[in-house]
Amino acid sequence: MVNREETVRVSVAMVTYNGAAYLREQIDSILNQLGEQDELVISDDGSEDGTRSILEEYKEKNRRVRLLQGPGQGIKKNVERAIANTRGRYIFLADQDDIWMPDKVERILKVFREQKVSVAVHDARVFQGEDSSHIQMDSFFAFRSSGPGIVKNIVKNSYIGCCMAFRRELLKALLPIPEQIEMHDQWIGVLGDYYAGKSCFLPEPLLLYRRHGDNNSAMVHYGVWRMVRNRLVFIYFLGKRIMCLRRKNSC
């Protein structure tokens, strides 16, 4: 008997919460480029707007869709739930309301084949609301001055979860995600920089990033004291995790 965990190439880890308005467009854009042995793992964190029924429908029709019940402890723990239940060699993160470009998966897999990196992140175009042709920003990389580097991304994070993918080997370092840190994407990206030396920032817009009133992530800056606090907390838990892994203890 073939072990399915050995045959899954790509796992997409998606988290949902009251995302019915744009969910179908995103799921279709993902499934259209996954192979038969790939999977879309969705952790729904108690949606009350019809999201769950949409997800159940996709699960019934497509065996590549796996549906989980979220822990009800916020987005970081829901992301952790989805990631921890993936089985693929390459793990892609996905929000519930964006649109993947048709060649996203193959372009990122090409990066992993050709470069010794544990994390790949690509550029995105930003649009508002329902009209994906109305582009407000041609490059998220330009907006965030995106690029690799541990110090750079601690000082100013340029990782964005919906544009990230990483090798399965990184799971042992990044899980569990500390509850106290601000952003899971920064945690994954910086740990990837630490283990592989440098992440790949691919300057190609492989995603249409939707902005609307319900987004969890914000394209605004916090106040100075909150930014300082967030960085100090991040550094503390990053150092703690690195020391833990060096000692090969349970983290």
Image (spheres, rainbow, N blue to C red):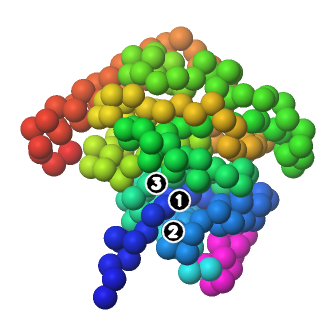
Percent of width and height locating residue 19? 70, 58
Residue at mark 3:
91
Task: Looking at the picture, tell me which residue is in the foreground, 69 or 42.
Answer: 42
Magenta stretch containing residue 52, yes or no? yes
- State which quadrant residue 233 falls in: top left
- State which quadrant residue 220 falls in: top right
Q: Quadrant of the C terminus?
A: top left
Magenta stretch containing residue 47, yes or no? no
Callouts 3 and 1 close, C-beta under 8 Å: yes
Residue at mark 2:
38
Residue at mark 1:
12
**Residue in the picture at 63% in, 30% down:** 203
How many residues crowd around disc 1 within 10 Å: few (fewer than 14), some, or many (20 or more)? many
**Residue in the picture at 44% in, 47% down:** 113
Which amino acid does the dot numbered 2 rest on?
Answer: Asp
**Secondary structure found at label 2:** loop
Which amino acid does the dot numbered 3 rest on?
Answer: Ile
Which numbered marker is on residue 77? none
**Secondary structure found at label 1:** strand
Which one is in front in this view, the residue at disc 1 or the one at disc 2?
Answer: 2
Q: Which residues are magenta?
A: 49-61
Most distant residue in the front direction = 114
Upstream in sequence: badge 3 or badge 1: 1
